[in-house]
Image: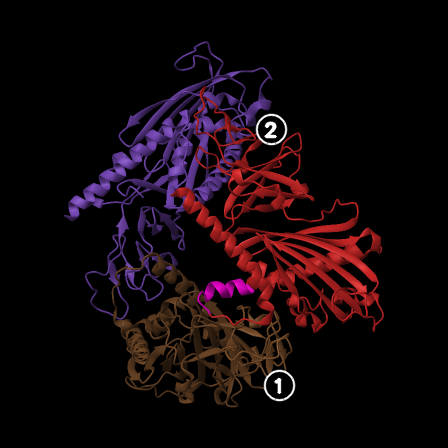
Chain colours: A brown, B purple, C red
Amino acid sequence: MFVKNAWYCAGWDKDVSLGLDALVERRIAGEALVLYRKPDGGVVAMEDRCCHRLAPLSLGRKEGDSIRCMYHGMKFGPDGKCTEIPGMSKIPEKACVRTYPVVEKDNWIWIWMGDPAKVDPDLICYAIGPSDPGWNLKVGHVRVDTNYRQELANLADLSHVSWVHGLTFGGTEDWSRIKPRHGLTARGIETEFCVRNVPAPRFAKHLFAEDARFDIQVHVRMSVPCNFILHFVVHERGTAIDGPSNGRVVLDTFSSQAITPRDAGSVDYYYSWGCSKATDIPGVTNLMHEANVVAFLEDKAMLEGQHRRMLEYPGATMVDIVHDAGPGKMLWVLDKLLKEESHANEMAAA
Amino acid sequence: MFVKNAWYCAGWDKDVSLGLDALVERRIAGEALVLYRKPDGGVVAMEDRCCHRLAPLSLGRKEGDSIRCMYHGMKFGPDGKCTEIPGMSKIPEKACVRTYPVVEKDNWIWIWMGDPAKVDPDLICYAIGPSDPGWNLKVGHVRVDTNYRQELANLADLSHVSWVHGLTFGGTEDWSRIKPRHGLTARGIETEFCVRNVPAPRFAKHLFAEDARFDIQVHVRMSVPCNFILHFVVHERGTAIDGPSNGRVVLDTFSSQAITPRDAGSVDYYYSWGCSKATDIPGVTNLMHEANVVAFLEDKAMLEGQHRRMLEYPGATMVDIVHDAGPGKMLWVLDKLLKEESHANEMAAA
Amino acid sequence: MFVKNAWYCAGWDKDVSLGLDALVERRIAGEALVLYRKPDGGVVAMEDRCCHRLAPLSLGRKEGDSIRCMYHGMKFGPDGKCTEIPGMSKIPEKACVRTYPVVEKDNWIWIWMGDPAKVDPDLICYAIGPSDPGWNLKVGHVRVDTNYRQELANLADLSHVSWVHGLTFGGTEDWSRIKPRHGLTARGIETEFCVRNVPAPRFAKHLFAEDARFDIQVHVRMSVPCNFILHFVVHERGTAIDGPSNGRVVLDTFSSQAITPRDAGSVDYYYSWGCSKATDIPGVTNLMHEANVVAFLEDKAMLEGQHRRMLEYPGATMVDIVHDAGPGKMLWVLDKLLKEESHANEMAAA
């Protein structure tokens, strides 16, 4: 169900503060985690259950680098080892909780949910964070009650912009006729296409002349578990009829989106969007963010409706269409990694 | 669990308007349906899931006679055939959604949930609709969280009027001593009895002298899946001690009730009640409707409590009483039709 | 899962009034019960489902000593025997509902959930009720969504006072170093210890000098299913370093707590606490009660968090600590009684 040897986004760095009570509960790939920030600024991620009787450590107390379970007072260091059991002088060897490798990058907190021996920081997905000096980016979060495979399918096929996002990003049916190139990468796909000679997206249409036409150049990098990194450049209508647009750049935008499966039926969706400072116009990043918030609710309604039907009709036959190429490739990569991991686990167990 | 070759009520005709956004979601006999009205006024009933990836069509858009899925833009005609897949010139043969035969009659929308080859409009239950010129009828709707078998049992035994409806239709224990005749029909039962020499129903008692006494002549036609058609005539107390009342008719009333199972644990209950114009008194239909609304909440509380106990005690033994004759006959008919249908399906599969 | 041959607390005597509509629904050890009080003041406890079609009797009507099901009017005497079926002259032998032995004691209503032939009033747990003339006691109720085994474990180890109740009963880590003696009794354990030389509990600290120190003498009697009877005496700091405190008694308090499992995932918690009139100070019982209400919410948050984790991680290994001695003994007693009862049932069936 989940690729364990992968980095999962646990939210924005600001979500885990230095505050005394800042114990953050997360559910990632079916597991309950607690996150907290040490006085030196480092983030610790642990199983959110005491090894004694499973009380949530997120109901506990930060003490320096450590966390204390507030049921019976057991204290755990940032490595998960128990360092104090009130009333006992000797601490049993096995008194410890699992910790998870954590990396902060691009203002996101990434957690390695798999074998610590296989940690590989190079597998953290490329992104641009809101503190990047070259960009004006605004961030958001939404929870969607669907399986993350449906999120992958949603994001790997942007033809849905014409329909789901007709009142925000869309406003033209041209998106539904895109013919993207989807290239395979080690952990996902890379997609490129240009939507040519279209009006401004619906949410920004009032800023331009009625007959203004644009090329929208899209470049997407997707990777497991469910990361979607989008370079979205608005050009004046160019003359090229193939390959990248050759129109003047109007707006150079970037969106980083990490969708973390909580369990089989819900995801936490962390996203940013905004403009390069080189092409920024006062107010435009705010406008884009407002449209983004609405657009993700448009997706949420559709994905949750779809998810309900998938649960009701588990064996339903489905008809494929041309736009399934992207989702098909991305899910193929996911399934390949799932199979490899399951095979490696069987080998290790044998 | 459900007789599929039967007409199921999907609500009042007014529930499905000509409005652009009027896509109505219904759950009937375990299936998710979307209903909409074409410009010519005809109603279309379809599976509420796109054949591509199961997105609900009820989140779609009406386009003339057609409906467009607003996830990836697939368009379906009123016959369920896909007529457009944006980005594709050829439409796969199997790109279609199931549609259901629909008939509007007596201001109700009826849907045939079974084999279209077996559609038989004669099986639509007899009723009198609110637009009938001879009657003043008011309509309502309530959802009840129970299995429709318990609704059948409730309606096939009106002795419960004395107890459940003591503050509305009842007000005398005479209902609990009725001895109805239940005749079998092809798809249900027909029941007749007279409650003699009783005060006015509780909700109307204040309109008459304290010692006024009436005969209430009841005629019920029930049919699968769960229709209850009631002719309820209030007479001045007559002299007949057997057969129909021979007292003067005070109020000639009619109630049409269609209870549609949504799934194994809930029903949609559509009902009307009112007076023949021949015996109408100003205000009486409103008064009856107000009592009816309360009475159906009285039933709802009892039926939902009973349903919870049925789920908690699945194997509980039950004691039969004399009033179970009606429910017994009606459920016997239902079970016979279920068995016949299941047998016919097996034959067809063999 | 539940010891059936035991007395279960169904709440305070005041919960079941003489009022006409006073039909009280309870869930005890997985069973649905209805309770009512007869005109002579006696309490009747019955299955909360009519033997006809399982309608809840708690939706019924009190009639003298009897209860009438308000679905079809069947009437049951306080012994559970059906005495009237409207419309029938003869009542079937098996028309009856199960009743349960009831005893009122110490302002609590106790119900015997097992074999009536084995009823033993001596097994009702010792308690002091709020009407006892020697004490000022205030009572409360809280529902906790956990399994009652976790409540047993919580109450059999008061080291958690230091952590869970740091803002109410605690305020010092000395509770986490207690070394209680736990003695076995026929149906539970008896626990005694003294917490010496500690500041006043947090909720009462402002009433004393900053450097005031006390000994807290604790005596607990626990019994199945989940009763916790606490004698809690605050002494001025004494000189004894072993055995009971020899300081002057400041406050002599008593708490009776009965925790009734509703089902595998929730309990009803009935509690009292207060002062002996001999040591009472105006206002102190109210202050204690206010602290108690908060403290039980502190427990509720922890226990419900723990319960969620237990459901999520059913096979999780757990590390034992020194303070598990009390919980271990109490659960051992429970499991022994469960096993004995299950064995006796098998013998009886063979």
Q: Tell me the kind of residue under disc 2.
A: Asp
Q: Residue furthest left?
A: B350
**Pick the front one: A59 or A68:** A68
Magenta stretch: give its range.
C305-316
Count neighbours of disc 1 (C-alpha within 10 A) and say few if under 14, some if 14 to 19, many if 20 or more.
some
| Percent x, y of residue A195 | 34, 78
Give the labeled residue for mark 2.
C65
| Percent x, y of residue B98 | 26, 53
Above or below for B155 versus B304: above
Above or below for B182 versus A70: above
State the separation of the CA atoms marked 2 and 1.
69 Å
Label pair 2/1, CB-CB below 8 angstroms: no
Above or below for C276 versus A140: above
Above or below for A166 versus B155: below
Protein chain holding label 2: C
Give the labeled residue for mark 1.
A39
Same-subunit check for callouts 2 and 1: no
The tag on residue A71 is none
Locate the N terminus of chain A by quadrant.
bottom left
Locate the C terminus of chain A by quadrant.
bottom left
Q: Can residue B30 be seen in this snapshot?
A: yes
On screen, residue B295 versus residue A216, left or right, reads right
